[in-house]
Structure formats: C-alpha cells, structure tokens
Amino acid sequence: MNNKQAPLPQSPLRIAAAQAQPVCGDVTANIAKTVELTCVAADRGAKLVVFPEKFLSGYEPGLIAGDPAKYAFEDHDARLAPIREVCRQREIAVIVGAATRGVGGLGGLHISSLVFNRSGELIEPYHKQHLYSSETKIYQPGTQGCMLEIEGWRLALGVCYDSGFPEHARSAAVNGAHAYLVSALFSLKTGYHQSRIWFPARAFDNTLYVLLSNHVGTTGGWETCGASAIWGPYGDVIEEASREREEVITALLDPAVLADVRERETVLTDFKAYGDETAGGYVVRRLD
C-alpha cells in the first residue's frame, strides 16, 4: 500500500460549520443566508465554513427533478455572485451544498458541494459518491474524491451518506487528509443516532479532524436533527450545535494535537489495504 501521507501543517486553522433551515425552492433567500452566516464565521476568525447538503435549494428532490434549470447550478451560474463576493471581501472559503448539472444541462444531475476559495473563485465541485436508493432515481454518483489545501491543511470532502462508509474517510486519510468535512441531512428520527456513531468513528479510526454541517427544521419532507459538530482526531467532540437553532460553530484545528494523536495512535502507519482504498483518486485543490 502506498500511503500518501502529507506533511503535518505548521500552524492552526479555524474552521466553521453552519446550520440553518433553507427556504424551500427560494435560491435567492438561501444564498443570502449563506452570505449572512459566512460573515458570522469570518467574524469568529474562521478561514473556511461548511454548509449543509443541497442548502441552496433545500433538499427537495421532487422540486429539483421537476425544474433542474431553476433549482440546480452550473459552473458559471450568475446567481452565485453574492457568495463569490463575500469570499473575496472576508477572505474566507465556503463549501455549500447544491444540486448541480453539467454545462447546458448535459451530464446529468449530481448532489454536490460547491467550493469557493478565499478569492471567490468557484473551483471544481465535489459530487456525492454514495447515493441512497431514492436518490439514484434522480442523481448520478460522483466518481472522484475531493481534497482541498489551505494553509498546509488537507481537507477531504464528503456528503451525508458518504460518511456511513468507513472506506470513504479511510481513502481520504491514506491520501493525506488531515480533516474530513461533511455536508449532510440527518433526520430527527434516526440521524442523530447515526451521526454520533459514524463521525467519532471516522475521526478516531483515521486520526482526522471531522466536521458535520447539518440542517435544522424541515426540508424535503424530512425533520432534521441539527447538532452540527466538530470532532478531534481522537474522536472527541470539540464543538456541537443545538438540535433546533440556526447556529455557527467553530473549532481550531491544531497541528500539535494532530501530531500527538498520530504518534500515539499509529493506525495510518500500520494500515494494510484489503482492496483499492484509493479508488476514485484525489486531486489537491488549493484554497489559498
């Protein structure tokens, strides 16, 4: 196994998770809320903020499938200009969930994380790789991982169900990730239970920082459970949001903590592959 561990970062990095209830189908309002909460994250010193899955339209599968030109996004979508502008003004990177479609509507629909760097440039999005059966009727799965680099930190992305597969975070870790950032919709009925098993395990099993950004309220017919959180590389909760309120939480990723945990817990060094854990590959994209 070729373990592609990146050098450890040299300085701390503050990141944020935002949670809110999107307005069903109101892209303009949801973009405005993204800008508002990005400013809150920047005021608290964050260099990057993550929003929930399909936040820009609401989860709303029927709405999106019925009018993808209105509710899904293309690479150069003019509606995204306010997010570009706040990234430039506040020098903060933004990851926000949206349905996307290929240029001119070609290439099908994806559940994606749109990625804006600190200059406001929209770089190649990450497409959710693991789809629920209901999602496969509308969306196509992504085929490649996404690794971002900012101030020496390597941050891998996931969307919701991706995080339920240990191999997804493991692939990120063996490809050099220091953190695993997930946009999601976890429901009130089962989601809190799932997330509190999956995310500490993803963190501890791979000695990664892990972030979850979840919805609050109702979207797409789902009652969601909030509780966005950030876990340390030992699987401990650093910060956790409420289950009901709109909120922005932040945490400082500390290279000294990461180094200490990885010295004591040598899972990445000792790991032996049983299959192709690097399937899908990673291209590192800079956010600086």
Image: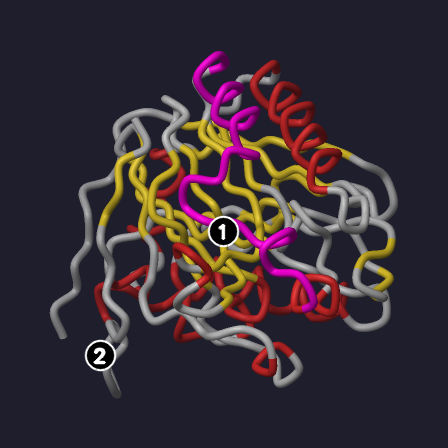
Give the main secondary structure, helix, strand or loop, of the magenta stretch: helix
The nearer-to-camera label among 2 and 1 is 1
Q: Quadrant of residue 93?
A: top left
Q: Is 257 rendered above or below residue 129?
A: above
Which of 129 and 122 lies nearest the eye of the viewer?
A: 122
Q: Range of the magenta residues? A: 66-90
Amino acid on which disc 2 is placed: Lys
Q: Is 230 positioned to the left or the right of 267 in the image?
A: right
| Comes first in the chain, label 2 or label 1 | 1
SS class of the residue under badge 2?
Answer: loop
Image location (x, y in percent) of residue 286? 26, 36
Q: Residue at x 56, y 40 (%)?
A: 50
Q: Which residue is mark 2?
A: 272
Q: Which residue is mark 1?
A: 113
The residue carrying pointer 1 sits among few (fewer than 14), some (14 to 19) or many (20 or more) residues within 10 Å by Cα, namely many
Image quadrant holding the N terminus, namely bottom left
Q: Residue at x 29, y 39 (%)?
A: 149
Q: Is 271 rendered above or below residue 14?
A: below
Q: Residue at x 67, y 27 (%)?
A: 37
Q: Is 180 positioned to the left or the right of 282 in the image?
A: right
SS class of the residue under badge 1?
Answer: strand
Image location (x, y in percent) of residue 11? 32, 25
Amino acid on which disc 1 is placed: Ser
